[in-house]
Image (tube, coloured by chain):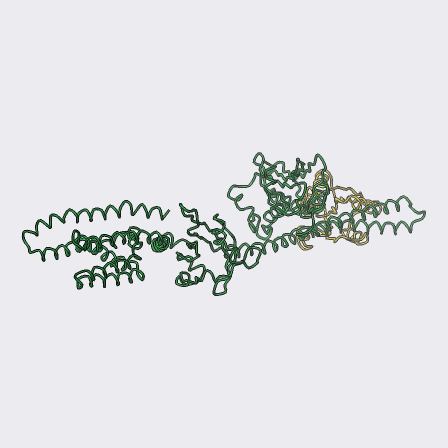
Amino acid sequence: MIKNRLIKGFEHHELNRARLIFGLAAVLQPIWYFATIHMLPNQVDSLNWRYFISLVFATYSVFLPRLPLKQKSREIYLAPAGVLITAHALTLSWLNDWHTHYAIFTIAVIATTFSLISTRLGSWLYTFTILATVAFCQYHWGSHFGLPLITLWALTIVAVGLLSNFDRSRALDELMRSELSSQTIVQNMTEGLIVRDRTHATVFANAATVNILGDAIEEIYAQESSIDKLVGYAPDGHEMSAEEWPSKIAVTTKRPVQNFPMEIKRSDGKMISLLVTAVPALDENTGEVERVVITFQDVSKIRQAEKELADNQSVLLHSAKLTALSEMAGGIAHEINTPLTTIATNAEIIENRLQQTPLNIAGIKASTDRIRKTVDRIAKIIKSMRALSAAEVDSRPELVHISEVIETFLDIGQSRPAQSDVDLKIEQPVDFELECRSAQISQVMISLINNAYDALKGLEQPKKWIRVEAHKYKTFAEISVHDSGPGIKPEVLEKIWQPFFTTKPVGQGQGIGLSISRKVAEAHGGALVYEPIANNTRFVLRLPLKQPDTVSTDAIFKKDVA
Amino acid sequence: MPSVILVVDDEEDLRETIAEFLTEQGYSVLTACDGLAAKKVLITQKIDLVLTDIRMPNMNGVDLLKFSRALPDAPKVIVASGFSDYSRDDIERLGASAYLTKPFDLDKLLTTVKGLALELKA
């Protein structure tokens, strides 16, 4: 893009300008000749010619460096031809007027030297030299020096053309560096931008590169760039060989490498995480890689945050489990203490009856039956508790009946102090098998039902209800918790999935229920969504019937739902 | 006229056991499976003592306690619970005559009930 603009720039502005000045000089030449030939002796005339034309081109050369950079680059192309001009001037001095040409020669040497050191000064001096030389050629036109001079001039132009082609890439690189360096956007963007040529020499690096990599710009631009000394690590943690770097891959494959995540060890030893994109720029004619443009983002902070979040998540999951357990503990204590009372009292009754004569066999039998029945109930409660406490994050999914899942969460979830006015209904038309970590799913359901109870608490409603429904579809199961509450306000809805968000009074909720529940659903390749019906709050848990071998994204599943 | 005791618990076996026992001890006993059922009984009948659980569906024991104590001819209330969010103090402040921790034995229950000086069957 820059290259195209550059070439257009020459063609339309620079060349026209040059043509204009050369044309002007050509027109002025006969006028000046006729004016001076009648007024001045020949010697003075020729000298004036020299000075005049030199002056015209010198003026041009003074103005040229002030032109925009991209137009000036033509002079950069011409720079290597300075050597030829030196030879040119030497020839002139040998043939003729040594003293005058000695000055030209000196200027040419200086110009060539400077053009190699400083583009700006070099191009200024060089322009002066080459144009002054053209003036000499014009002066000698028609004399016996004419032919060799014209030949040299033509050769110069050819050589300049060839050399400029050879050096075009380097010149463009130079240009690109100065052009890009002066651009505010490039220098102020937070992403690092590096342009390297096909030999992996660094053509350009922006200010962000310096900030991110922590090396001085000189070190980056150095022949042995500090970039090449960086140690990179692939996402799997292995140290990348030079061939594996995105910039190298882009050059080798001639294809862009996008958002490649890698870790880099800076020269100061600090580890940073980057997202690197490397785009090869191909030469239009040859199709070869000319340079590669590398942009990169420092995502260390994001990665760090993600890591912390992941750490927190496991802590949260644990904490959620504890909350659920402590919520349950009360229920469990009650659930067990009550039947224990039944056992204790019946044991007492049996003892009393054993002392009676005649023995009240029927009475004793009734009590032993109650004891046996109650023991079974306790065993069942303990089984449910065990199912819940086994809710380890990495437990294996098992094939369970949806009825068992519902029973587990009802056994324990329902034992909270029930609200007198809430009607809890379970609708489960068909029992079906589902592959899941049932303890986790039960926890999600308990959390949803508890939320529903809490939402209904304090609502002025003639009939409050919570409906739990379980349905089986072709590839997934849908379990929903639907309550008579008025739905969730939009401003609250935005936040419900955030960890620690809660609308419950201080001390009642930890606000981790929904965020963790969603994680659990996602870990199952499913989803937990808020889908109100007729303005009533409704949460839907969708789970695939079969768990994939690896924990995958929910893409397939979502498609199915749609 | 023996005193009427209302036994409220969602655990059927326990409810029946206690009811049987108290009947044998000479009290007139009614039962209710939860707070709401108990409330209905309390509205229609004069009850001298309510023995209630706390955690129950459809109106818990604490709400029942509050309701009972607010009645014109308020019955005495014994609250029995295995675990609750309410402490003994909370329960007693709400007007309960006694608090029993489950599991309790019948002796303890009987002592508590007797302590309330209720009328027995003639």
Of the pair A407 and A315, the residue shown nearer to us: A315
The residue lying furthest to the left in this view is: A39
Position of the C terminus of chain A, as image quadrant, is top right
Q: Is residue A552 left or right of residue B56?
A: left
Of the pair B101 and A558, the residue shown nearer to us: A558
Image: A152 above or below A103: above
Residue A362: % across, % down? 90, 43
Residue A488: % across, % down? 55, 41
* Image quadrant in which you'd find residue A99: bottom left
Res A253 seen here: yes
Chain A: drawing colour: green
Of the pair A37 and A91, the residue shown nearer to us: A91
Res A182 seen here: no
User: Residue at image x 53%, y 41%?
Assistant: A489
Residue A270: % across, % down? 50, 63
The residue lying furthest to the front in this view is: A144
Image: A37 above or below A432: below
The residue lying furthest to the right in this view is: A358
* Image quadrant in which you'd find residue A80: bottom left
User: Residue at image x 17%, y 48%?
Assistant: A26
How many marks are shown on the rendered structure? 0
Of the pair A467 and A429, the residue shown nearer to us: A429
Residue A514: % across, % down? 59, 47
Chain B: drawing colour: yellow
